[in-house]
Amino acid sequence: MKSLKKPGFFHELAKNKVLYLMFLPVAVYYILFAYVPMLGIVVAFKDFNYRDGILFSPWNGVDNFRYFFVSGKALQVTTNTIMYNVVFLAIYTIFSIMVAIMISELASKIFKKVSQSFMFLPYFISWVVVSAFMYNFFNYDYGLVNNFLRALGNEPINIYSEPSYWYILLPVLYLWKWVGFGSVLYLSAISGIDQECYEAATIDGANMFQKIFKITLPLLKPTVVILLLLGVGRILRGEFDMFYNLIGNNGLLIDNTDIIDTLVFRSLLGTQDFGMASAAGFYQSVLCFLIIMIVNTIVRKVDSESALF
Amino acid sequence: MKRFRLLTLIVTLALVMSLILTGCGQPASKDEPAKTAAVEKTAAPEKTADEAAAEEPAIDTSKEVKLYGYLLGAAPAGFNDVMAELNAKLKADVNATMEISYIGWSDMQAKYPLILAAGEDVDWIFTAPWSFYAQQAGKGAFMELTEEIFEKYLPRQYEQLKGTSAFTEAQVDGKVYMVPTNSPDKKVPAFVYREDLRVKYGVPEINKFSDIEPYLKAIKENEKGMVPMNLESNYDLGTPFGALVVESIDQTKDPLFTTGGGSGLVYKPFDGDGKLYYTTGDSELAPYYVTAAKTMKTWYDANYINKDAFANKVRSKDSFVQGKSGVGFGNSTDLQSIIAQAEGLGYDVGVVPTVGGASGKYMADPYINNGWAISASSKNWERTLMAMDLICQEESYEHLVYYGVEGVNYVIKDGKIDLPDGITAENNTYPPDAAGFWFTNKNLHLPLATWSDSYIKLYDRIPSLLGEDKLAAFNANTDSIKTEAANCNQVLIQYNNPICLGAVKDVEAAYKQLDEKLKAAGVETIRVELQKQIDEYLASKK
């Protein structure tokens, strides 16, 4: 009878102490840097002041949330954020896979390394620098592009007052910056595919495209799904750096390029209220959580192997 | 197969993690505090024999400390030399050294509150109503300064401020959190233009801002590579528009004004009744705003204004010196060095104040328009106060931080501040006023030998150009209207700034939209609350 008794927590600890010891640093890291800071969420429900600090400032219910919804902008910026991120995620995934497959199929080792490095380079360039590039390229009076257009006798373009250019520029810049990084993720997955599959296919007379579509892509699917899921989890977190540095407070572009993060940043600069900013952050987190739960459930229903949890 | 998939997963996750981790990376911590702190000062009680030494016997300065301060703007090239000399002096007098950092103009709104919120390594910081004084004081970011503290630690400053309205002006909910300057600037907003080019192209004289159109046209047509008005995204954006408005309806002021934002309501400072007006809709002031906006639009459409003002971070006054802008905007104080540099390059500079059309005046600065505060988290506030008292009020300190190192950046000749031999206004590494110490005792200043005739003419006129703003010391309390204030601020940034720049397609329609958005954002709630506060304030002053 004794053996049927469920072993206690400490028994479990003692039995696998080495494994738990190995797990300890990770646990400490997450508790310290991911769970403890979550307490900060209370600021969203408080009338924050420096004297009383985060924990002792007076509560003020949902007052901090009012600003976000009363302005009527919540819907617009939420849609903008989701739309931009869906486009970003889609092109990022597609192009990263394409580039990864291309690189993996290249024969020349040197060309492979060089092209990969060049594509990876933009990842290290900050958006501040990119915005300086853009300014020098597209500035109406002296910009490179506009000088070129004028030299050809065309009308110069003014990207800083015309939102439609940004629908193209933003995704292109995003791709330029991230595709090198994304392709490395997929390349590592491709190099993990068993070479025997390809050998067998070659013997059976398959050409390159058949191998890509019948072997590489199907075997990449689990990686794609995981990365997509992680990407979807961030879908309400706009690329703040990018939007803020490229567009800033340009009133002419705001309606079309405003995301949650930039709206919050801009409106709260004047009042400098941490509570209201946290409220918006809280709203983002809740929506993110809901979205990832829903998407993960769908994935689990369709293909339980690929789901995150 | 299974094994490979696992490996793939691990590599992928590792890369993703590294991405997340680099995103969260902490910037390297600031350089460690002065190592010399360990060296015990042998003759601690020994102090330089200035008159104040006797007044502060109770203050223990035996332990050396390092003080951290923040100013606005950017450090001039010669800043480190000045700091080296300043630290030598401070070490001898109060056994402390100081490290000063700058908050740049373009990211001031974001960085200023962050520095105070982080609360690390900040003992004192520049503050003023236009630099978030009331907001930050209300949140408890600054240390309260009682009269006893002033008497004990700031004897020289207290001597100068005693009996003035400075303390009343600095009150937030009845308490003082800042040390205002004792010599408020006598300054008016102004703009500079190229007098030599005006004459060259036969353009009529420019006596007020609205005279400028023919000049802009001449620059556009004749000077390739120069934009008539090369505006920057923060300070300059609303300045020409504001100058036009002020000329037509006299001075107006937004009670919640911050650079680039506000409430959308204004009062007339010289009227004294503190009545708040809308600037849109059926307000009696609206037609003036619409007219000014239409003028801006014709200029913008004619390419007199740079099309990328929203992305440009170089102020027009600096572009002016570089020959890239036909007009430079600033005030009669910060344009001093611009004019000196420009004339050094051989330009003939014209300078015109932008004052109210009817009154011909601008609001005189209150005491609190420049000042500094002790951060609530300061560990060495006593020593900071003592050091700042010297910097603000002792002539040798004051001249050092304001004019630079004697013999290197300036010499005193015939009772005037002049440049040493071989130094010109453009290659002076520490131009006067440029370092951001705007709160020192300016009564200690001497006239500059580099002042041009056009500047002296303006300088002499300044006292007659100043009028009293009855609400100069009014600090709005936005606690109960913070939702509406945040929304209106955002509406102004989005809808008003393009109007001010002239970058909208249809001015009337844009104003109608601004009016609707402001009303939806709750501007009426703000008006009612602020009007109540203003009326109470004016009643309390009677």
Image (cartoon, coloured by chain):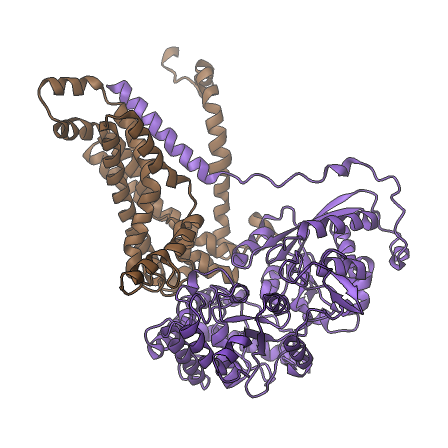
Chain colours: A brown, B purple
Along the line of sight, which residue is nearer the eye, A252 or B420? Answer: B420
Q: Position of residue A142 (x, y in %)?
A: 39, 61
Image coordinates for residue B78, horizontal then vertical, percent: 67, 53
Q: Residue at x 47, y 68 (%)?
A: B237
Q: Is residue A75 visible?
A: no
Camera sees residue A213 = yes
- Above or below, A260 relative to B290: above
Q: How many marks?
A: 0
B12 and B49: which is toward the camera: B49
- B207 up-or-down from A216: above or below: below
Q: State the residue lying farthest toward the bottom.
A: B358
Q: Residue furthest left?
A: A205
Identify the residue shown where x is 66% and y is 66%.
B370
Relative to B170, does residue B66 appear above or below in the rendering?
Answer: above
Is A190 above or below relative to B508? above
**B374 relative position to A281: left or right:** right
Where does the N terminus of chain A fall, quadrant-wise? Answer: top left
For residue B413, side relative to residue B256 (left or right):
right
Q: Is residue B276 left or right of residue B474?
A: left
Image location (x, y in percent) of residue B508: 35, 79
Along the viewing direction, whichever of B51 and A279 lies nearer the viewer:
B51
Residue at point 73%, 36% (across, down) = B35
Quarter residue B497 falls in:
bottom left
Q: Nearer the viewer, residue B69 or A160?
A: A160
